[in-house]
Amino acid sequence: MSDTTGTIYTETVIYSATEAFAADVPYQTAIVTLDSGGRVTGRILGERVRIDDRVARVEFRDGVPFFRKLA
Amino acid sequence: MRPVAVIGIGKTPFGAFPGRDLRSLAVEAGEKCLRNGHAAPGQVDAFFLGNFAGPSFVGQSHLAPYVSTALGIHGVPSTRVEAACASSGSAFFHAYTGVASGVYDCVLVVGVEKMTSQPTPKVTEILAGAGDCAGEIKAGSTFASLFAMIARRHMYQFGTTREHLAAVAVKNHANGALNPDAQMRKVITMEQAMNGKPIADPLNLYDCSLISDGAAAVLLAPAERAGEFTDKPVRVLGIAQASDFVALDQKPDITTFPAVRRASGKAYAMAGVGPADIQLGELHDCFTIAEIIAIEDLGFAPRGEGGPFTLEGHTARTGDKPINTSGGLKSKGHPVGATGVAQICDLVLQMRCEAGERQVPRHSLGLAQNLGGSGATCVVTILGTV
């Protein structure tokens, strides 16, 4: 089972952030249930996702996983 | 273990007080409390301070003796307790265990936070320190966003709606409008609560508690000695603290807080009562969804029905289970480290029939629920005059 693909468990779009993320608003974060088991909190790139959407990890930035919606 | 009573309470108003520093707020609450309990500083056997982030907010550490000596309390154990938003609930729990076990007689607990000297993005960053900074926070989460993700999942699993969330805000503002010590004494409409500025979907500004300065204090003593201090003692009938994961993504189910279920289960058992017996509650509404889930975890409503229970008016001041008659964190204010002790003060006011315009008719058995972070700490206290 892959640890690079998974399913959205929950998500939010953030409009009010700390200084470090102020330039990114609005941005989406999500908790992803990985196909390999376990959950991780990451960022969503591109199209917004909803609960149950399938996603794939496309990169790590400073240890943070970034996911993109699978077609 | 011997029975313990609250023999004194004291609070500052909650709000934004540019001219006040942390210590002056804590001292004001402590002095009011000692006066209220007819006790002298020299009678205090131990001091506990609940404070989340004084070192970050105002740059001061070693806060417990910094405050207690200013109150004229010298030489005795003086300890700061930090458990995020449950800091002073936890301080209260540890003070209780000290009195119940017989180690101390008279213990003063003060909770304080001075938040408004920092701009909002900095406050957001300091609060985020109560999350998992190596995981969820590094990914850009704020506390509002963590509770937003909880709300999303609760909506998905149980059909909770935006209207349910708004009903919590409208109710708590209606209560806070009657509380002279509340930060935002403003009634709001459902329409306003539904359409606030977005913070983290599905939560808007009206779903979020306030950034506040303030302090609260309680004085504890063995119940058998309460009569020496006050003719209106309130008994601690049940109390428990429980813990859980700090990171939200480690919890198997984010629509319930196991620490709340565990703490309340133990507190109910200790008091020999159940959820149906509780006549009023001060619950931790840091975000509207948190009150809805607390209602469910404490057993006031079945799982998934906290939203409808609120919309139907059960938790209103005039309902059969009044929740947050003080206005809650939402309207009264949320100086993080003061909140747990402030909840106790507000219950005691109701139980002594001193709650003024917001007084409820049934007030002999009350429950306070103080939550830290996204559920990693919970303290539940059951107070009674019976």
Image: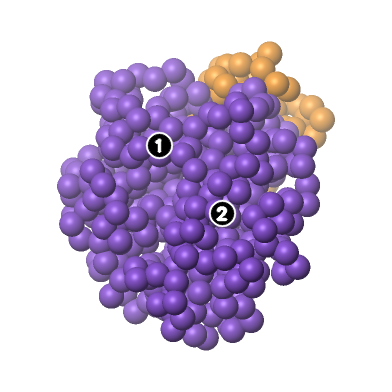
Counting from the top left corner in percent of width and height, residue B275 is at 30, 66
Front residue (pair B84, A22): B84
Q: Which chain is purple?
A: B
- What element does badge 1 sit on? loop
- The chain whose colour is orange is A
- Which mark is on residue B330? none
Residue at the extreme right: A62
- Mark linked to residue B182: 1
* Residue name at image x 53 percent, y 29 percent: B16
Crowd rating for badge 2 (residues with CA inside 10 Å; few <14, some 14–19, many 20+): many
**Sequence-wise first label, 2 or 1:** 2
Contact between labelled residues 1 and 2, with CB atoms less than 8 Å apart: no
Q: Secondary structure at mark 2?
A: helix
Mark 2 highlights which residue? B30
Q: Is residue B105 visible?
A: yes
Q: Pick the quarter of the image with the C terminus of chain B.
A: bottom left
Which chain does the numbered disc 2 sit on?
Answer: B
Q: Amino acid at mark 1?
A: Ala
What is the x, y in percent for residue B218? 50, 60
> CA separation, marks 2 and 1?
19 Å
Camera-near label (2 vs 1) is 2
* Position in image of residue B272 (x %, y %): 34, 79
From the viewer's perspective, tell me whether residue B77 is left or right of residue B328.
right
Image location (x, y in percent) of residue B231: 34, 71
How busy is the neighbourhood of tag 1: few (under 14 within 10 Å), some, or many (20 plus)? many
> Considering depth in this image, is A66 or B94 the residue closer to the camera?
B94
Mark 2 residue type = Gly
In the image: residue B212, left or right of residue B194: right
Position of residue B176 relative to residue B116, above or below, is below
